[in-house]
Image: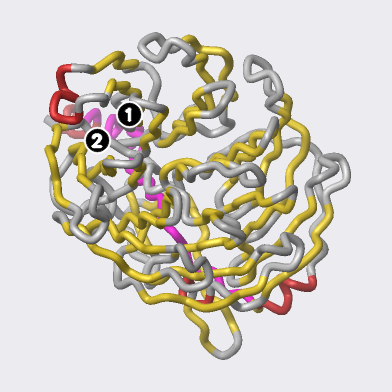
Amino acid sequence: MITLILVSLAISSCQDEITTTHTFRAMVPIYLEMSDVRARTITIAPPQELENPGKIYLYGDYLLINEPTKGIHILDNTNPANPINKNFIPIEGNVDLAVNSNILYADNYVDLLAFDISNINNISLVNRVEDVFTQMYQHDTGQIITFRDSVITSENPYWGCVNCAFFAMDGSMSFAANFSAAAQSYGTGGSMARFTLSSGHLYAVDETSLRVFDVKDPKAPKFIKPIDLGWGIETIFPFQDKLFIGSNRGMHIYDASTPSSPTRMAVYEHMVACDPVVVNEEFAFVTLRSGNFCVNNINELQVINIEDPYKPYMMKSYPMLNPHGLGLADDNLYIAEGRHGLKSFNVADVMKIDQNQMEFLESMKSVDLIPGPKSLIVIGPDGVCQFDYSTPSKLVKLSCIDVKNPVTVQ
């Protein structure tokens, strides 16, 4: 018996201690003096690998890819089968972008920056409009409070952090991108953009408002005013003389025929869910999805009749898996289904969209896309891919730019 006890003690003393750790992705608060940020010189950097790409934007033969809160990659996309990474503009706090007549607009925390990109090898900062995105951040004693996307490891499965914003390790809360109607001197963004251009004006939405800038002189943007929209604003899409603003409660339609002072025409309301939107002359196509901060278990495509923009109404809804961004090219609708893949539909008959699915590329994880003049550009957790879509029903992959640290989306 004594021998047995001794053996038992010897075995237990040789066992390794096992520690279980838990990994969280959190938006950790960072306190900054904006005066310090403004004092730093922005020096154009050589090309860098994509780590966690956010918004995508197409301007002429250039593809711009935002690295959330870090800056913007610029690629020569003359040949979509072989995009060439040219350089990187480091911009702290950057989430959105738009280009007007070779002037790149980008947010820098609470400021709007304007860069001259007419010579891609000699990019220069030409203007800064201060304190225009103040609603996006809290101000206290001269500091701005922003958040940094951080990965935190803890032995506590319920790790806590005061004032941290949490989201699942899938990282899809990410800053995915928005589709804006193109004009001759403007670029094209994805369907989850918060910046867009129309009629010599830049429009930027934050969580509660629409901010209007006069950019008729592209190098000298002038902030005009904010317009209160209510809570939960997410995306903006211009079409003709109207602005279609997606929120997690519905779609706002604004008359922008007087560009400096858009006025509300109608609000189409739905259940609370994440909501990007694209439109044509007759219909708005809206995706609703569950996951992250998009509450309610709704995953569907809604078709909204907007022939009378003062009285929008739903024509029909179609179940989806987990739709994110979307893009419309003629009668062809492309929908990013998150980790489930990429879908395409012919929508000539909006009452029979489910009967006219063209493809479902399950291997192409996707969060947003741009139907460009040369290629369909799709962004997902693994990178940015381009497809020849000259035959809409049969996408042909041209190229993919891999990311350094891929994440998993819902």
Residue at image point 28% right, 22% down: 345
Given the image, on which type of amino acid does mark 1 rest? Arg
Where disc 2 sits, the SS reads loop
Dot 2 or dot 1, earlier in sequence: 2
Between residues 227 and 167, which one lies in front from this camera angle? 227
* Whether residue 19 is visible: no
- Residue 259 lies, with reference to residue 74, above or below; the image says below
Identify the residue shown where x is 66% and y is 76%. Answer: 130
Q: Position of residue 355 (x, y in %)?
A: 15, 17
Mark 1, Cα crowd under 10 Å, few <14 / some 14-19 / many 20+, is many
Residue that numbered label 2 is attached to: 322
State the residue at coordinates (48%, 13%). 390
Residue picked out by circle 1: 339
Cβ–Cβ under 8 Å for marks 2 and 1: yes
In the image: residue 26, left or right of residue 211: left
Q: Is 124 located above or below residue 142 in the figure?
A: above
Position of 2 with respect to 399 (left or right) is: left
Residue 9 in the magenta stretch? The answer is yes
Is 110 a magenta residue? no
User: Magenta segment range?
Assistant: 7-32
**For numbered disc 1, what is the local secondary structure?**
loop
- Cα separation, mark 2 vs mark 1, equals 8 Å
**What residue do we see at 46% from left, 63% from top?**
257
Classify residue 169 by image quadrant.
top left
